[in-house]
Structure formats: C-alpha cells, structure tokens
Amino acid sequence: MAQFIAGLRDQPSEEAFSPIAVRNLQESLLLEHETKNKAARKVLANNAKKIRNGLQNKRKQIKEDAIQALKNNLGICLSRFRSSIRAELEQECLGLALQITERFIGKLATSDKRLLQKGLRSAFEEAQEETNIQIAFHPSDREHLQNLITASGNSEYKLLADPEMQQGKAKIIAGKRRFVIDWEEQFERISRDILLEYSAKSTHHEHQSH
C-alpha cells in the first residue's frame, strides 16, 4: 500500500486520479483489508483454541482433584465412624466387666482395673477386622460408589443396593448404629471449593505478572 501511494506521488495529478488509478487504489485497499482480517481471524481462532484447551484441562484437573478429595473424605468418614463405634463399645463393655468383677471379688485394685482394661482393648483390636459395616445406596449409584470405596482402600465394607435410598446418598450401617452421607453434595461442594482456589491462584498470579 505504501509503495502504491509513493508511486502515485511520482505520477502527474491527472494520471493519479484516473479511473484506472482509483480502481487500483481500491483493489489495493481491499486486498490489504482482507489480509489484515485473515491475520486477525487466525490470531483470534488460535487464542480461542488455547482458551478452550485451557478450560478443558482446568475442568479435568478440577474434577480429578474433587474426586480424589471425595475419596479421602469418604475414607476418613468411615474410619471415624468405625473408631467411634469401637470406643463406645469398649467403654460400655469395660464398665460392665468392672461391675461384674467387683460383684464377685468385692473390690478391685487399680492394677487389676488396668489389666482388665488392657485385656479388653486387645480383644477389641482382634475383633475390629470382623466388625460388620455395611453401606446402603441406590442401585444406580453402585458403580460410582464401588469405585470410591475401592480407591479409598476400604474394600472390606459390604455394599447393599436399596431402591428406597435417594440417589447421591449412602447410609452407613454398623449394628444398630447408622448415619447417612450425601456424597453427591460433598462432591459438588468440594468442586466449588477447588474452583474458587484455582480462581484465587490465577488472580494472584495475574497481579504478580503486572
């Protein structure tokens, strides 16, 4: 374009504004405009592709992090539930054993109580592996819940399909004790927390780069 204009300066004024010169100028302007548009479209397309890829990778990472956090959460929840049951049973049995022993021998020395307590704890530790803990769930959640249980290292728990259970929820049963966990709600909450964490990190990084 610059070369074309420079050429016009060297021509006589009548030739510079002749129909041919004007047409050539229009064609040159259109060509330059189209070239710039193509370059701009290419840059925009590349940027859009990078953004899409970045979002897909971030979504994938967020989902993976959320699933891992949920697995850890479920494992901790089950472990605490089992520990809570064991502690309550241990205290109840210890109290009952002390009452029975005192009734037969009249009095217990401190050392006798400690010995009895130690024996009971050993018995509970041996029986802990045999504790029957079941997890009831809606049949449509079997595959997802089975993957979570297996990945969390708690494959010894028994899964029970229960059509009356609501989807996205699971009921943990141990003897007469039971409670319901909403793992789907936990997953959504964890996903939101991780997304907020990613956003905060991105914003912090942008401020530092400026």
Image: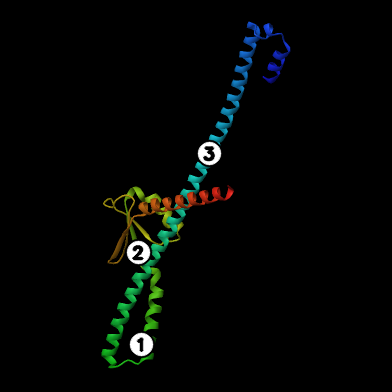
Q: Which residue is mark 3?
A: 51
For residue 54, side relative to residue 77 (left or right): right
Q: Give above or below for 102 relative to 145.
A: below
In the image shown, does 106 or 77 lie closer to the viewer? 77
Of tags 3 and 1, the one toward the viewer is 3
Counting from the top left corner in percent of width and height, residue 21 is at: 66, 9
3D distance between C-alphas at marks 3 and 1: 69 Å
Give the quarter of the image for residue 91: bottom left
Counting from the top left corner in percent of width and height, residue 202 is at: 52, 49
Please tell me how many numbered marks the rendered image carries: 3
In the image shown, does 32 or 105 lie closer to the viewer? 32
Q: Residue at the spot x=36%, y=91% of the render? A: 110
Q: Amino acid at mark 1?
A: Lys
**In the structure shown, which secondary structural element does the residue marked by tag 2 occupy?**
strand
Q: Amino acid at mark 2?
A: Ile
In the image shown, does 178 or 33 lie closer to the viewer? 33
Q: Residue at the spot x=55%, y=38% of the render? A: 50
For residue 105, side relative to residue 128 (left or right): left
Q: Which residue is mark 2?
A: 133
Counting from the top left corner in percent of width and height, residue 86 is at: 35, 72
N-terminal label among 3 and 1: 3
Of tags 2 and 1, the one toward the viewer is 1
N-terminal label among 2 and 3: 3
3D distance between C-alphas at marks 2 and 3: 47 Å
**In the structure shown, which secondary structural element does the residue marked by tag 3 occupy?**
helix
3D distance between C-alphas at marks 2 and 1: 30 Å
Quarter the N terminus occupies: top right
Callout 1 crowding tier (Cα within 10 Å): few <14, some 14–19, many ≥20 = some
Give the quarter of the image for residue 119: bottom left
**In the structure shown, which secondary structural element does the residue marked by tag 1 occupy?**
helix
Q: Which residue is mark 1?
A: 113
Counting from the top left corner in percent of width and height, residue 139 is at: 33, 49
